[in-house]
Amino acid sequence: MDTNQHDEGDERLAGDLLVGAARIAEHISVLIGEPVDEDDVYYFRRAGKWPIGKYGAELIASRKKLNRHAQKITAA
């Protein structure tokens, strides 16, 4: 594997990753056009309502997965 390809993949992944409830809340707010705060994000995670994971003490989410999820729930 070309190391350039590996580096580009890492950069794409890093650009897709949201770390922390505040950053995830900002992104979801933009997606749904409604204010979302950190408490909402923790609730979404506990309830399994959005694709939000945990890495150590931090919440993490993929922009791409959040975008897909928002499209799915708003298309219904």
Image: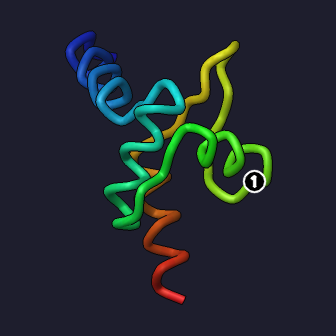
Q: Which residue is mark 1?
A: 48
Between 57 and 37, the one nearer to me in the picture: 37
Between 38 and 73, the one nearer to me in the picture: 38
Instruction: Give the answer, above or below, for where 62 lies relative to 6.
Output: below
x and y percent of residue 73 in the render?
A: 54, 76
Residue drawn at x 46%, y 43% is: 25
Residue found farthest to the right: 47
Residue found farthest to the left: 4
**Left or right: residue 32 compared with residue 38:** left
Between 58 and 2, the one nearer to me in the picture: 58
Residue drawn at x 54%, y 89% is: 76
x and y percent of residue 58 in the render?
A: 61, 19
**Left or right: residue 72 compared with residue 41:** left
x and y percent of residue 59 in the render?
A: 60, 28
Task: Tell me the element at label 1.
Answer: loop
Amino acid type shown at disc 1: Gly
Around disc 1, counting alpha carbons within 10 Å, would you say few (fewer than 14), some (14 to 19), or many (20 or more)? few
Tell me where residue 4 sits by quadrant: top left
Quadrant of the snapshot with the N terminus: top left
x and y percent of residue 75 in the render?
A: 47, 85
Tell me where residue 9 sits by quadrant: top left
Residue drawn at x 63%, y 41% is: 39
Instruction: Give the answer, above or below, for where 71 lies relative to 18.
Output: below
Residue drawn at x 51%, y 25% is: 20
Counting labels gives: 1
